Image (cartoon, rainbow, N blue to C red):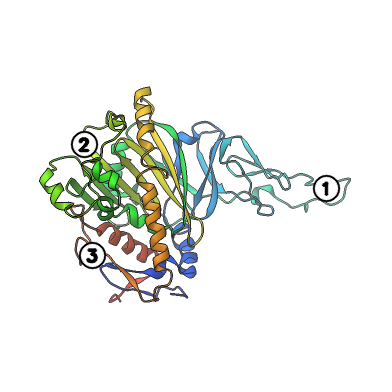
Amino acid sequence: MAHHSSTHKWPTADFTRVPYRVFYDADIYRSEADRLFRGPHWNYLCTETEISNPGDYVISYVGETQVVVNRTEDLTIMAFINSCAHRGAQLVRRLRGNTLSHTCAYHQWCYDTKGALLGVPQQRGVKGKGGMPADFDKAKHSLKTLRVETYKGLVFGTFSVATPPLHDYLGPKIREQIDRIFDRPLKLLGYYRQRIPANWKLYLENVKDPYHAGLLHLFHVTFGIYRPTMSGRVFMDETQGHSVLRTADIGEQQADVNTAYAGIDKYRPDYKLQDPSLFDVKPDYPDKVTNMILTIFPNVMLGQVANTFQIRHVRPKGLREFELFWTYFGFADDDNAAVEGKLRQSNFIGPAGYISLEDGEAGRLVQIGVEHREPSDMSVIEMGGRGPIADIDTLSTEVALRGFWKHYAQSMGFAPTGAD
């Protein structure tokens, strides 16, 4: 795959195999920038809550491209590449803030919140000499903007005119799950940032993989956040690139738990919490969902773990590294006890907790392991069966990974073996 083109073949038509080189091939990584992040896909940028007032802005990313997302004076949302139209310098240097204009530090070119060029110092020269040409038109030197659309307070951007409306891109199955959580105004609680030395797609594999969750995460299993014996579902949108994993504490039998973990040390019923208040948190929803992982292609995840709610944005930082940017939120009508409970539980999920620390290490181990495999080597993704990719009511499956790779291959122009 050193010279990427639409003629390349994916090794299996049912996507039960993934070539390891997608995690280390530089040409494929460069092609992803064009086909995924600048292609006809919506990329998560931020929440509307973060830019509530005129002049509010945040820095975000589409792939490796840094963008500024801001609320304009007329309360619309605009996003533009964080690069001055003059000589390309980074324009905005703070991660977030409030301003009604953006001025480049290099030559002081100034732009409004919609990215239009307002002023150029010495445009007419000094003492009648120099300056810009007489026909220089500021209107032709605006910042490079993105299309922006929102759904339930989530802000997405795209560089492509071919990207369908966000409402259609998400589809009814995904919108229903977003509607469940984003049913009222949000309250921002804070952020985590985590650098992981692995290709960005390994994290998408991870969050679409219920198989590992009951085997890697002792804390999940022991304290009843996630076990494969729980009531569970895995389902996808029409493209199968978006997916939802859900577990609910309904109908689980202790005998089934004992059988599933016979000979495996990840279920430790003898373990107790020194501070049981970690789980003494009133749930926001009565449906007994303990874990909900919703991924939107290409690289964002909306999650509920116990009674914490977060957005995880996967930001590539080169071929072998990515930043996982967590946005934790509650709800505007939360009282102090509800906020405190969410913050308390966030501690065991984030990069210093019992879950994401292990997920990051898993990605690192895979990256190390595949780096020097033969070019023809590939992973085996058969948990849950081969053949058609379909929704399933079990957690012993990897079907959502196959759906992701199917949509990835289509987006990248990799035809499956046996296809015309």
Residue 201 in view, yes or no: no
Under circle 1, the secondary element is loop
Q: Residue at x 39, y 60 (%)?
A: 365
Residue type at the position of mark 2: Lys
Of the numbered discs in the image, which one, if any, rests on residue 382?
3
The tag earlier along the polypeptide, 2 or 1, is: 1
Crowdedness near tag 2: few (<14), some (14–19) or many (≥20) residues, C-alpha within 10 Å: few
Residue type at the position of mark 3: Glu
How many discs mark residues in the rendered view? 3
Q: Which of 397 and 162 is in front in this view?
A: 397
Q: Where is residue 335 in the image (x, y as percent from the top left)?
A: 36, 22
Identify whether 222 is placed above or below 133.
above
Quadrant location of the N terminus? bottom left
Q: Whole-Å distance between the Cαs marked 2 and 1?
A: 69 Å
Residue ID for mark 2: 288
Q: In this view, does 56 lie to the left or right of 198?
A: right
Mark 3 in CB contact with mark 2 (< 8 angstroms): no
